[in-house]
Image: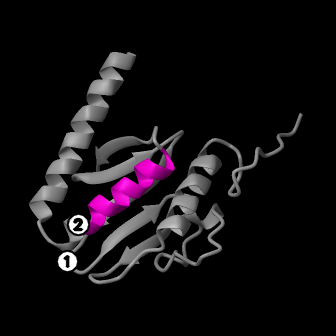
Amino acid sequence: MTNKAEAQDDQAASALIDEKIAKLGDWRGATLGRIRALIHEALPDVVEEVKWMGTPVFSRNGIICTGETYKSVVKLTFLKGASVSDPAGLFNASLDGNARRAIDIREGEALDAAAFMELIQAAAALNAGRGATGRQTKTAA
């Protein structure tokens, strides 16, 4: 795919996410919008995609997290969350899995923005092969 085509795909996905947020029209849309803004602040070059029946997906060197909306929760699922350091304890769902971890946000709940952005950066670093802390991991020669 060319860079121009990739840019068009990114714009199309971003427009679909904008539409999803607007259609929700309630606390879930507002929450997803705030989360999206934090992700972009933490990773200005994050790629937005839409997969799995309209689910917003945020990627860099692989999927970082998804932003799912349900009746009573906005769920942020980190595909490699079990391998990401979470010193603030933001992960509160899908804790039994071998790979995934999630953050469930309910109406009226606040999210520690700084800790969330660190989590996003750590997940992106893991995707880039720098481990859960963001440092380059050693590879066998």
- Crowding near the residue tagged with mark 2, few <14, some 14–19, many ≥20 C-alpha atoms within 10 Å: some
Whole-angstrom CA distance, mark 2 to mark 1, is 14 Å
Quick one: label 2 or label 1, which is nearer the N terminus? 2
* As drawn, 12 above or below 64: above
- Location of mark 2 (residue): 30
The structure residue drawn at horizontal position 56% and vertical position 62%, both measured from the top left corner, is: 119
* As drawn, 74 above or below 60: below
> Which is the main secondary structure of the residues drawn in magenta?
helix
77 left or right, relative to 55: right
Q: Nearer the viewer, mark 2 or mark 1?
A: 2
The answer, for residue 1, to whether it is visible in the render is: no
Location of the C terminus by quadrant is top right
Query: In x, y percent, where is residue 12?
Result: 22, 35
Query: In x, y percent, where is residue 48?
Result: 35, 43
Q: Check residue 55 for magenta coloring.
A: no
70 left or right, relative to 83: left
Location of the N terminus by quadrant is top left
Magenta stretch bounds:
30-43
Q: Amino acid at mark 2?
A: Ala
Q: Amino acid at mark 1?
A: Lys
The structure residue drawn at horizontal position 82% and vertical position 40%, both measured from the top left corner, is: 139
The structure residue drawn at horizontal position 11% and vertical position 66%, both measured from the top left corner, is: 25
The structure residue drawn at horizontal position 46% and vertical position 70%, both measured from the top left corner, is: 102
* As drawn, 93 above or below 10: below
The answer, for residue 54, to whether it is visible in the render is: yes
Query: In x, y percent, where is residue 115?
Result: 55, 68
Image quarter for residue 95? bottom right
Q: Check residue 34 for magenta coloring.
A: yes
SS for tag 1?
loop
Q: How is the image coloured?
A: one colour
- Location of mark 1 (residue): 71
